[in-house]
Image (tube, coloured by chain):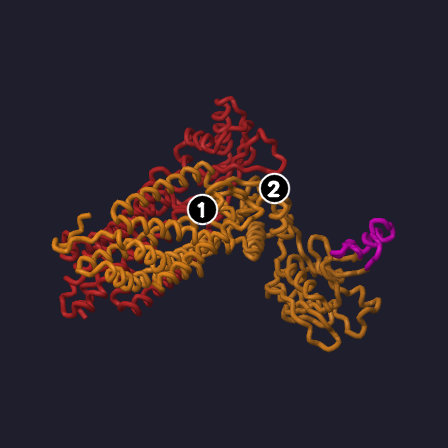
Chain colours: A red, B orange
Amino acid sequence: MKYFDFVGKRRIFISISVVLVAISLIFIFTRGFNFGVEFLGGSELILRVESSNFTEADVRKVLGEISSDFASARVTRVRSIGDPENILKFSLTLTKTFMAEEKADLQAQIESKISEKNIKGQVISFNETGGSAAEEIRRLTWRAVIITLVAILVYITLRFNFVFGVGATLALVHDVVVTMGFFSFFNYELNVPAVAAFLTLIGYSLNNTIIVYDRVRENMKKFKGKQIASIVNDSINQVFRRTVNTSLTTFFVVFVLLLFAGNAIKPFAFGMTVGTVVGTYSSIYIASPMVIRWVKNR
Amino acid sequence: MRANRVRLIVVIAVIFAAFLALLWPSKGQSYKGLAMIFQRIPLGLDIKGGARLEYRVDVEQGVENPSEVVDNVWTVLRNRLDAAGYTEATVRKTFRENNSFIVIEIPAATDTTRAEKLLGSTGVMYFGQVLEESQIDPQTDPRLKDLARIKKAEWLPTRDGKIWYLVREEIMLIKDMKLVSPQIVSASPVPETRAGRFGYKVTFELASKDAELFKKITQQLVVPESSVGSAAAKEKRLAIVLDNVVQFAGYVVSVIPDGKAEITGNFSIEEAKQLAAILRSGALPARLEKVSAGWVAPLLGSDIVRTSLWAGIVGLIIVFIYMVIVYGIQGVIADIALIYNTILLLGVLAATGSILTLLGIAGIIFTIGTTVDGNIIIAERIKEELRAGKSIKAAISSGFGRCFITLFDANLTTIIAGLVLYYFGTGTVKGFAITLIIGVLGSFFVNIVLSRLLTEAFSSLIRKPTVTEEGGAQS
């Protein structure tokens, strides 16, 4: 098996990561996120179509033709008790709110686009709507984030040592911040599925880091007195095949999802794809090399 | 080998229990073929849709801050749904033409009348004064109808509909002395301990903002216990009215200074529980008027759910093939472990009745990752031990022994993160945390028990890497 020098150029990689985190933070705080309608609210239109085979995709297409901003609109079929079978109703949720004239304009555009298909369509209500999921993450505040990090720090300190705990938490913060930076940079919609990706990423990042640490811990016991830098590098090399294969299998699933999954799921697949790559990179180049310096200095 | 026989029995017992939980006949959803596995797992709004109810909030004219009233309505409804275990339901405020609406979507509910029941009363609650009672329907007696008009009060039936009370909102006709939509912090049934009484009583506590008014009301209505039942006392009874039904009417025997009151009536435990539930469910600060009841399709869009499902399956198949190519027989074992753990996780979800949302599916994908990872770690470790010159039997034994610690630490760290998420999260985030925790525990079990069983059973098929070459990892 090839033997790589992972830790030799650790200063370069740590610098790259510091820059990456800095750029991500700049994007997060200046450009912000393209929040989904679940968080910010927006407008909800109820569209009534006199046809029995109009689909959600058709409605989405009509919206996309009107403006590319609406391509990511949430379209869902709704049905009230007593609605006849040959009439379909759709709920259209847009992240924008409209002035009175704009409302009438949009309404007319949607109705005329549908009538081009010789189908009668009518916007029967135009509401402003609040977010339904804002409450979901309201409690996931900084307090929750800090408690998570402290709990992990304590556990790793008990099982490994304090330095490793700091390394793992910093790697975790690195992964989440950089992935958030990607969301901001590519203007991907930050919706509930995207939050799912971030939550998954936490577990994924930790798992990757611990596997490497576990090997370092084992080798430190086995080769007492050996230089920490070479122990760490040996350890990364020993688990390297595992790291690559595990990351590849996860990557297959989420990348196929990113290529083919529908709009609303895309943010989830995007977050997972970026997270997998960033998490793998940080477990090799950041989490363990970072530990070397502190262990040496002790 | 004895250890393996124990493993085999445990593995079969666990998967049997999972299948039992999954395939136990249910009345709800019916699926055919492979989808049978999902019949007992309620799916979330985002994947399957659910019942949709829309109400107009009837904010009274001249209310200072209408948006605060709507916010309070929202909170009460949210709490009711949470208390009923429907944390995955959504409650949204919408506005049009100066009207406020509340849209409620409840997952896994196909029956809208049941959904409405779940939501509870949409009416207003108030504490009123009882002036008169009647055993016959006041609507049939013009004399009683006149009495209501003269007294500026209303005839309201009790819950069983056998007695009618003449109730007035304003206590003793004092201006503004009325307690509408009281905020009740807690209410619970308590066994009766006083001599001469039996059964249960109900204690409740008003929020501090209502306590002062309640004190004044009780000062007005208090009657000495000795005169209970007399004609004068009968006109001073206090009624708890919800949805224009008298839920309870009784005497005030002492002034309540701090909002902490108790209702005695020698109730049975069921009666006490019911009354406490009515008090606790929280009164709505405004009446709700039903606009529509119906159903909503999957919120993500049914077409999107379908294509994403297919994408997920394609991704999984690639993983299956990749594992077999790279790890041979151990790849096959990993694939079996993967299927096993997924069924196990779905079984636990079915048994606990957790609602599966997209976040839950993210948890399942993570579980798949952890299970595959565990198997890769074990396979790589065994390969290393073999390279070090150990026999296959010894390599398997020491490989699993060492991986136990590795997986233990990796999985426990993830579980700690999951527990914090569970504690702080609400609704769907909690659902994610549950699948994450169950899935990681399952993957640990599968890696240590099932994978070991299979690896030892098929140990003759494991390829021994050549030791002479430095590494010899070319497979």
Q: Nearer the viewer, residue B265 or B114?
A: B114
SS at badge 1: helix
Considering only vertical position in the picture, is A208 above or below B204?
A: above
- Magenta span has B138? yes
Q: Kindly identify the residue that appears in the image at 58 percent across and 29 percent down.
A: A86
Give me the disc on residue A40: 1
Q: Farthest front residue?
A: B1
Give left or right: position of B201 versus A111: right
- How would you rate the neighbour count of disc 1 (Cα within 10 Å): few for under 14, some for 14-19, many for 20 or more? some
Circle 1 chain: A
The image quarter in which residue B75 lies: bottom right
Residue marked by disc 2: B293
Query: What's under tag 1, amino acid-wise?
Result: Leu
Horizontal and vertical percent position of residue A69 = 40, 35
Q: Chain of mark 2?
A: B
Tell me the kind of residue under disc 2.
Ala
Q: Secondary structure at mark 2?
A: strand
